[in-house]
Image (cartoon, grey):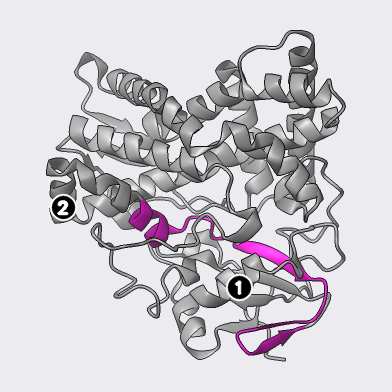
Amino acid sequence: MTTPTPRYPALPTVRPLLDPAPEYAEWREGEPIRRVTVWGENSPWLITRHEDARAVLADPRLSADATLPGFPGLRPQAQAHAPGKFSMMDPPDHTRVRRMLIPDFTFRRIERLRPAIQRICENLLDAMTADGATEADLVEAYALPLPTLVICELLGVPYEDHDFFLRQSRTMTSLVGDPDEAMAARKALHGYLGELVAARIREPADDLISRLARDRVATGEATAAEAVGMASLLLVGGHETTANMFPLAVVALLRHPEQLAALRTDASLWPGVVEELLRYLSVAHSGMRRIATEDVEVGGVRIRAGEGVVVALQAANRDPDVYTAPDTLDIRRDASGHVAFGHGPHQCIGQSLARAELHLGLSTLVHRLPTLRLTVPLDDLPVSTSAVHGVPTLPVTW
């Protein structure tokens, strides 16, 4: 066994803003599957190569069940069974629960949402530039409310309650917060959503929570607790990743003005640049976590039953064996095959929605505000302490 390395992931305050910590490239080159420490004596295997990452995430012998002893979760407390939280389930439960949500996240369904997302983008920018304003915090004015408004509309969660659930979400996903506070936040959010599910059973509307309540809970296909777990996962995941990635994507494009100019003149480049930004930024820096239910060999390393595994998505997506000059942003690159959304049966169910939000949000912003620029040096930007990498503020002018 190799000597355990410092805690994974490295604390966000010491990371480069747009790049993974340099250790990941060193490990990928020298010891691509190695031990790391996540907390206490829990030292799972860290996966840093793209090929190995896809193999791990597709292997049914590597479980996502966080209730299993030794699971390398974010915190040392044993996880209680969370009904409906399908990201931490294995088949057949994972398949059963995920299948209930697929109709709301198909590519065709998300394409029908694009006009509504575009209207939200325009309305937010109208408000941001009202009365001749020429500066703003882009996170507060645009990057955070955009995915929050979209997921609220999709789920049927009142947007006026967003301050409440954003606070709970930040507490739940903090890498440095009190574990007891995280559990309290989870309980508070589930209590709120439980009341909302009960209300939708009585009076359904045209939203996802109503469809869960009417078509799944009321028919006995799912329990109310499962509906709450599904809604919680979608609510937190539906804004957290996009809201954190968006300002980093803006910074990345501003640092490459020649590529940004090309995007302003050739709209056909936007779908490709979204994929490249997903690969380049890979904001889920806390990794995807698994535990072996039997002995598995990955990349020539034997992982024993009961040992944890963490897939470093940010390292896998910068693998030079897959992407030429991987540390360079290239909007014309074919970035397909990246693992920013994971891989295999647990690949993010909301990926089409995230792509639409990033495409419409970024393209609308750069066309509406062609002189957009930062008002502070890049190194002065604070870094979030969330499991999802980002910045809590982004002062800009135009």
Question: Which secondary structure, mark 2?
Answer: helix
Residue 49 in view of the camera: no
Q: Can residue 299 be seen in this view?
A: yes
Q: In this view, does 81 lie to the left or right of 122?
A: right
What's the mark number on residue 305?
Answer: none
**Quarter of the image where the N terminus is located:** bottom right
Query: Which residue is more in the foreground, 132 or 307?
Result: 307
The stretch of residues the image draws in magenta is 275-303
Circle 1: element type: helix
Q: Position of residue 336 (x, y in %)?
A: 39, 61
Label 2 is placed on what type of residue?
A: Pro
Residue that lies at the very extreme toward the top in this rendered image: 203
**How many residues crowd mark 2 within 10 Å: few (<14), some (14–19), many (20+)?**
few
Nearer to the camera, 202 or 249: 202
Query: Where residue 258 sits: x, y (%)?
Result: 13, 55
Q: Residue 92: x percent and y percent?
A: 80, 52
- Kindly report the distance in space between the C-alpha atoms of the residues bearing marks 1 and 2: 37 Å
Residue at numbered disc 2? 257
Q: Name the residue under label 1.
A: 55
Q: At 77% from the left edge and 52% from the top edge, which residue is drawn?
A: 89
Residue 100 colored in magenta in the image:
no
- Residue appearing at x 17%, y 54% in the figure: 259
Between disc 1 and disc 2, whose residue precedes? 1
Q: Residue sitting at 27 percent across and 45 percent down?
A: 270
Name the image quarter holding the C terminus: top left
Q: Say what amino acid the circle numbered 1 marks.
A: Ala
